[in-house]
Image (spheres, helix red, strand yellow):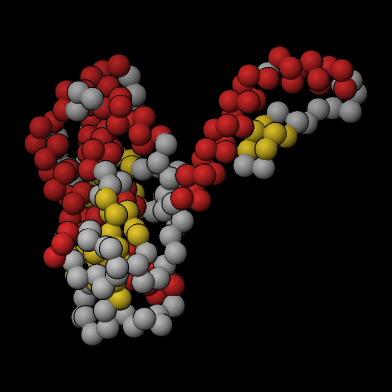
Amino acid sequence: MVVGVEGLTVRAPRWVAWADIETALRAKERWICKKLGEQRERAHRQQAARIDWCEGASVPFLGESLVVVLEPGLKAPILRDGHAAQTGLPGVAQRALHVGLPQEAPPEKIRDTVLAWMRHHARAHFSARVQHYAEQLQVRVTRITLSSARTRWGSASADGSIRLHWRLVHFSPAIIDYVVAHELAHLHEMNHSPRFWSVVRSVMPDYEGVREQLRHVVMPE
């Protein structure tokens, strides 16, 4: 039996009696209900994470929301903070990313422009955090690469190279720090043994809580 986005799927050989299938389902009832609830919750989070790429779109950046403002004539995107952000949008007084696109710009163009800006800033932010934790852990990093891997937030190689998913930049600085510390700890221990987690804890004593947050994040779309 499998619980997925479309609900519960049960497969069994033709010779298995319905009564036996029902017995198995009853035995797993609590597990099934739990997993169905988790799937519903994840679906709700995914729906909430969808971005309508237009004027006024809200995009997560370092754990906060940026409002997208289309401002034709700008040569490059400009980030403006708080009340200084002249969004031109009623009631909006938060960080705003002004991009040099016309109001009629297609959603794909707005998305690509905003994400390109974020990717650029991801590299700068990640590099600073890698340097910070590399000094604390006394490891040598030979290269930092941004990735778009589907299933991994980061990876480390014995030669000192580090790969980080660039869209971590959507999430809080604490989550980014956890992934960075995790990968750099692998330069001491290329495993997930108790010694590895001791290395992580040495620079991030509260890593377990942050790791749990990471397990529940949803990538904006």
Give the side of residue 115 with respect to residue 159, left or right: right
Spot the residue most to the front. 91
The residue sitting at 26% across, 18% down in the picture is: 195
Give the side of residue 213 with respect to residue 141, left or right: right
Relative to 98, residue 156 above or below: above
Relative to 11, residue 70 above or below: below
The residue sitting at 40% across, 80% down in the picture is: 105
- Residue 166 visible in the displayed image: no
Q: Residue 134 at x, y = what percent?
A: 13, 37
The residue sitting at 70% across, 28% down in the picture is: 1
- Quadrant of the rendered image containing residue 109: bottom left
Q: Nearer the viewer, residue 70 or 84?
A: 84
Give the side of residue 58 with respect to residue 73, left or right: right
Quadrant (top left/top right/bottom left/bottom right) for the C terminus = bottom left
Q: Residue 7 at x, y = what percent?
A: 67, 38
Spot the residue most to the bottom. 73
